[in-house]
């Protein structure tokens, strides 16, 4: 029986317009009240934004943010942190990359970028989270948690080759969405962070269930006792983890649909609603 449930946010728990559906919220509350399950939100979003979101939901949950670079307790206490090495940050921020993608840095102060791009604000419309406009070349390299490139997927794939050649084993690269390539500290991913949290709670990863839709969920989904892939997930994630069940689409609140079945009729075969 699962005792800890971890949820990716965008493309998984949230609707396509980036807010949490009522059915999903009610189901999460049922997990807490009826099964006394511990909840964790595992996301690429910043902890400052997630605290605001949690405050509007009246939910107690651990936060794994920045794609595993930070873990915070239900009370807001920092439990774990990992930042890009200054060397890796220096290479990325001062490199000359053949790409049309925009570049964004993150640290404890928030989201930092060279210019505001209106379409990137859509995902943050309900939280009001916005970037600080700065010259990233002036950002101290020891004050960078992670770096993201946002743009066309094919362009980002070519950029990934350039970054891999320049960084080697100094960073971990992954797609958190089709249009977002992230440069993360070595050893940082949602799976590693969930393992730290599980151990803190006296659990193993086999005691966990997790839901996700993108390549930044891969390590988490592959390590837990019960990993579930969204119907709208990136094709590569489904190809990499073919043994995991695929549920419905986030637009249909598929996480709530699956968990309601798990809570009420676990003896019946689950039929996903795509």
Image (cartoon, helix red, strand yellow):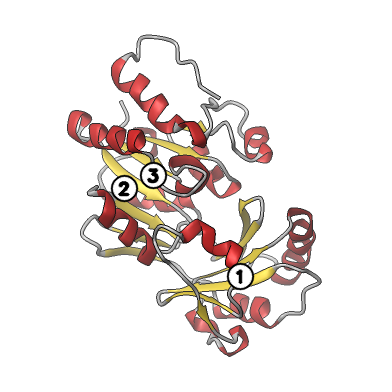
SS under mark 1:
loop
Q: Circle 1 is placed at which residue position? A: 117
Residue 218 percent across, percent down from the top left? 56, 43
Q: Circle 3 is placed at which residue position? A: 20
User: How far apart are the two marked residues, 1 and 2, measured between alpha carbons?
Assistant: 40 Å
SS under mark 3:
loop
User: How far apart are the two marked residues, 3 and 1, measured between alpha carbons?
Assistant: 24 Å
Q: From where the camera sits, is residue 3 visible?
A: no
Going by the image, does 130 lie left or right of 5? right
| Residue depicted at 61% across the width and 70% down the height | 117
Q: Earlier in the sequence, mark 3 or mark 2?
A: 3
Camera-side residue: 197 or 50?
Answer: 50
For the residues labelled 3 and 2, say whether their Cβ atoms are less than 8 Å apart.
no
Residue 228: numbered disc: none
Q: Earlier in the sequence, mark 3 or mark 1?
A: 3
Going by the image, does 151 lie left or right of 262? right
Q: From where the camera sits, is residue 112 visible?
A: yes
Q: Earlier in the sequence, mark 1 or mark 2?
A: 1
Q: Circle 2 is placed at which residue position? A: 199
Can you tell which of label 3 and label 2 is closer to the viewer?
3
């Amino acid at each position: 029986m699962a005792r800890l449930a971890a949820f990716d946010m965008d493309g998984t728990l949230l609707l396509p317009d980036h807010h949490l559906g009522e059915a999903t919220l009610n189901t999460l509350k049922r997990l807490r009240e009826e099964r006394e399950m511990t909840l964790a939100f595992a996301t690429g979003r910043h902890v400052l934004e997630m605290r605001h979101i949690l405050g509007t939901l009246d939910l107690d949950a651990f936060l794994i943010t920045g794609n595993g670079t930070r873990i915070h307790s239900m009370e807001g206490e920092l439990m774990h942190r990992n930042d890009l090495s200054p060397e890796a940050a220096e290479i990325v921020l001062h490199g000359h990359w053949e790409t049309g993608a925009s570049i964004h840095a993150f640290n404890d102060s928030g989201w930092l970028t060279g210019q505001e791009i209106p379409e990137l604000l859509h995902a943050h419309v309900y939280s009001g989270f916005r970037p600080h406009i700065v010259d990233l070349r002036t950002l101290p390299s020891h004050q960078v948690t992670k770096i993201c490139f946002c743009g066309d997927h094919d362009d980002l794939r070519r950029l990934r080759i350039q970054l891999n050649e320049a960084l080697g084993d100094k960073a971990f690269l992954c797609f958190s969405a089709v249009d977002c390539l992230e440069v993360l500290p070595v050893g940082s991913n949602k799976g590693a962070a969930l393992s730290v949290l599980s151990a803190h709670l006296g659990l193993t990863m086999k005691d966990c269930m997790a839901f996700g839709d993108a390549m930044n969920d891969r390590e988490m989904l592959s390590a837990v006792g019960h990993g579930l892939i969204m119907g709208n997930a990136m094709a590569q994630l489904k190809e990499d983890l073919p043994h995991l069940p695929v549920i419905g689409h986030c637009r249909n609140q598929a996480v709530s649909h699956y968990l309601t079945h798990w809570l009420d009729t676990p003896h019946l075969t689950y039929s996903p609603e795509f």
